[in-house]
Image (spheres, rainbow, N blue to C red):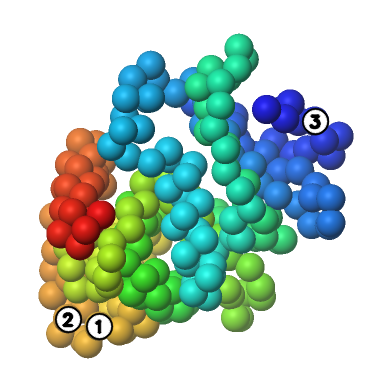
Amino acid sequence: MKPIFAAADHRLIKAESGTLVWSEPLPAGGRAVVKLYRRRPLHDPLRRLFTPYRAEREFRILELLHRRGVACPEPLGWSHGRDRVHGRHERLATRELENAVPLFDLLAGGAAAPGLAPLFGLARKMHECGVVHGAFYPRNVLVTGPAAAPAFHLIDFAHGRLFRSSVVGRRPGDNDLLDMLQTIARQAPVDGAAGWLEGYGLSRPQAQALLGRLPHHRIERPWRHFRRIAVDTLAIADRARLGG
């Protein structure tokens, strides 16, 4: 495994007991963001009999979205291994988006939030690819460009799942939308939510029906874990029904 922070010009982004994230220069120019899932549990090899590596799953989802023109970082590669420092680990590298700011920071900063209809339009494209984000929150959306015409980019598909067909109008897709709306509601007004959902392609009655579910949609544990288990079950059944 390449030593951590072998590049002199590394920039640490996040350091947690189970995850390290940093950026480093690429040989041909630009920078990569590297995510290291470390100290994976002892039962992880057994789990690999049923599910892909987390880094592999993220890579495959990003690869699909990038190929289909859905705004997200370009995936560069993934790997897995084991060493004395990090134990069992998985590694994902993507191309860094220059001058990108998390949507969470914009909402929390008190500045005027960007219009979010394009973000929900991006979610529509993601869902049409059969991708469920699983953690569709403002911290997992990066914003680039001027405030008058922001561009949104989807990141962090650690909880993402891939279906063989569109999830628009299905419970897993709706959960993504409700996750985003509920999280935004804790930081900023959501008075324009019906208009945002029109960006997704919902009619005003459809948007109002979805928003009617918002007060009862909980994003805390264990509720979000229950929903992820349900999505996992549906994704497995989807693959089995269509031949793996």
Q: How busy is the neighbourhood of tag 3: few (under 14 within 10 Å), some, or many (20 plus)?
A: few
Please provide percent x and percent y for residue 165: 27, 70
Assign a secondary structure to mark 3: loop
Assign a secondary structure to mark 2: helix
Is 45 rendered above or below residue 29? Answer: above
Task: Identify which amino acid the numbered label 3 is placed on.
Answer: Ala
Q: Quadrant of residue 202?
A: bottom left
**Residue bearing mark 3:** 6
Residue 158 in view of the camera: yes
In percent of the image, x 61 and y 48: which residue is there? 77
Q: Nearer the viewer, residue 15 or 171?
A: 171
Query: Outermost residue, top direction?
Result: 84
Please provide percent x and percent y for residue 178: 26, 61
**Residue bearing mark 1:** 202
Q: How busy is the neighbourhood of tag 2: few (under 14 within 10 Å), some, or many (20 plus)?
A: some
Q: CA distance from mark 3 to mark 2?
A: 52 Å
Q: CA distance from mark 2 to mark 1?
A: 6 Å
Task: Identify which amino acid the numbered label 1 is placed on.
Answer: Leu
| Left or right: where 238 falls relative to 47 | left
Task: Identify which amino acid the numbered label 2 is placed on.
Answer: Gln
Q: CA distance from mark 3 to mark 1?
A: 48 Å
Is 144 rendered above or below residue 138? Answer: below
Q: Quadrant of residue 61?
A: bottom left
Rendered-image quadrant of the N terminus = top right
Residue 17 in view of the camera: no
Checking the image for residue 206, the label placed there is 2
In percent of the image, x 50 and y 59: which residue is there? 62
In percent of the image, x 43 and y 38: which residue is there? 53
Please provide percent x and percent y for residue 21: 61, 37
The disc, 3 or 2, on the residue closer to the chain's N-terminal end is 3
| Left or right: where 4 falls relative to 70 | right
Rendered-image quadrant of the C terminus = bottom left
